[in-house]
Image (cartoon, grey):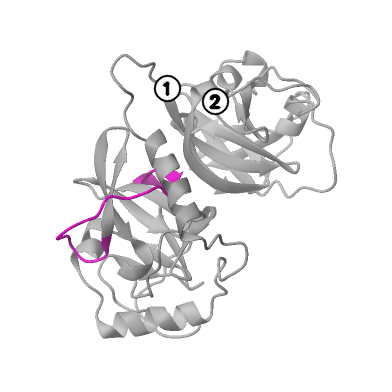
């Protein structure tokens, strides 16, 4: 099993190991690439750094298209450089089962493409980004990927996509301006990378620097005598960790059924435990000066472990405060 970041590109379900992902941002205006390698769509200025942008769909042999405001840029590391992959959108963070040589995927045999693996579920997993970028697809690879695409329903096929060229360009340019380095003498806005997740029909986020991994919920063992917000303990990579139910910790009134089928394992290097979540909704950069204090009407319950709220609907957790609270640690764990 491999912990991966799942996304859509060119109508295909794709994934990359979570360790290769630096951040995810909304599509912004690009500068022309000039004489550039295959499928290099242009460059972006990301906080003062020039980053090459590769059109992921075209790299996979799919038809290209103009930038859409709903598209995303996946900032990743090849090992020697930082690049941006132009993708259609984010799916989730999950564990994937890899195919073995000669194993069937259901539609066809496992295909051999440098840097890629097709999982039994038909997900295109990028295992070696540098190798993939260095080797153009052969016809057999394009045909196999096209067969996978035909079995997919494109999440952005036609509905809800803004088509007006001038309006799209204006939005993309406005976003790009926010990514430029500040003018001399101006106040610098501190940025942080966050992982977003859903819980109890609300959106939360936690700083990526505290996230070790995301795993599927396994067997949870209750621990008698612990607070209501401790759901129990479970094993994660051979380590026994306590599991925190944020609904109880933040005193959020329960509304309907939730899945709680993901565990976000957080750590500060000394303390490690898991936070239960319904699903993972994405990752990206946020400006700390855009985080406002939430009102009681926005999130009923305790605000003790919140940094604040972003865009009036994403609640940013204070992971440092949670990890440093001795009342959350299960001593026997």
Q: Which residue is mark 2?
A: 290
**Residue 191 locus on image (x, y percent):** 43, 27
Q: Is residue 82 left or right of residue 237?
A: left
Mark 1 crowd level (few <14, some 14–19, many ≥20, 10 Å Cα)? few
Identify the mark nearer the N-term, 2 or 1.
1
Question: Can residue 36 be found in the magenta stretch?
Answer: yes
Quarter location, residue 330 = top right
At 53% across and 41% down in the image, what residue appears?
Answer: 236
Q: Residue 129 at x, y = what percent?
A: 28, 57
Q: How far separated are the C-alphas under marks 2 and 1?
A: 9 Å
Residue 105 visible from this viewpoint: no
Compared to 150, does 299 lie above or below? above
Q: Secondary structure at mark 1?
A: loop
Local SS, label 2:
helix
**For the magenta stretch, what is the residue range?**
18-40
Give 90 or 63, whichever is nearer the viewer.
Answer: 63
Specify whether 38 is left or right of 47: left
> Hey, which quadrant is residue 101 in on the image?
bottom left
Is the residue under label 1 in contact with that under label 2 (CB below 8 Å)? Answer: yes
Q: Nearer the viewer, residue 80 or 277?
A: 80
User: Looking at the picture, does residue 252 appear above or below residue 202?
Assistant: above
Residue 90 position within the rendered picture, expressed as x and y whole percent measured from the top left: 51, 54
Q: What residue is at 39 percent from the left and 84 percent from the top?
A: 109
Q: Is residue 275 left or right of residue 46?
A: right
> Which residue does the numbered mark 1 point to in the structure image?
189
**Residue 315 visible:** yes
Q: Nearer the viewer, residue 131 or 63?
A: 63
Q: Which residue is pictured at 28% across the width and 73% down the height?
A: 113
Give the image location of residue 21, x and y in percent.
38, 46
């Amino acid at each position: 099993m491999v912990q991966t970041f799942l996304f859509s590109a060119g109508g295909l379900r794709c994934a990359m190991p979570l360790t290769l992902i630096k951040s995810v941002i909304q599509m912004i205006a690009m500068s022309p690439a000039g004489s550039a390698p295959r499928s290099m769509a242009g460059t972006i200025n990301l906080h003062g750094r020039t980053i090459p942008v590769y059109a992921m769909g075209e790299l996979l042999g799919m038809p290209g298209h103009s930038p859409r405001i709903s598209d995303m840029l996946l900032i990743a590391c090849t090992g020697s450089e930082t690049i941006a992959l132009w993708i259609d959108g984010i799916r989730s963070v999950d564990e994937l089962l890899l195919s073995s040589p000669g194993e069937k995927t259901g539609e066809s045999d496992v295909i051999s493409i440098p840097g890629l693996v097709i999982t039994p579920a038909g997900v295109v997993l990028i295992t070696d980004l540098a190798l993939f970028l260095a080797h153009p697809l052969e016809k057999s690879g394009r045909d196999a990927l096209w067969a996978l695409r035909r079995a997919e329903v494109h999440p952005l096929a036609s509905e809800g996509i803004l088509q007006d060229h001038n309006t799209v360009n204006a939005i993309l340019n406005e976003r790009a301006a926010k990514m430029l380095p500040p003018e001399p003498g101006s106040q610098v806005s501190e940025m942080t990378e966050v992982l977003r997740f859903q819980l109890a029909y609300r959106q939360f986020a936690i700083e990526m620097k505290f996230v070790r991994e995301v795993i599927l919920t396994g067997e949870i063992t209750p621990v008698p005598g612990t607070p209501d917000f401790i759901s129990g303990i479970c094993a994660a990579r051979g380590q026994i960790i306590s599991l925190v139910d944020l609904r109880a910790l933040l005193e959020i009134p329960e509304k309907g059924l939730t899945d709680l089928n993901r565990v976000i394992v957080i750590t500060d290097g000394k303390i490690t435990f898991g936070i239960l979540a319904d699903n993972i909704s994405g990752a990206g950069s946020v400006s700390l000066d855009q985080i406002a204090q939430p009102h009681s009407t926005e999130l009923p319950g305790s605000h003790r472990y919140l940094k604040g709220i972003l865009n009036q609907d994403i609640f940013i957790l204070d992971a440092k405060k949670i990890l440093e609270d001795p009342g959350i640690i299960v001593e026997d764990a």
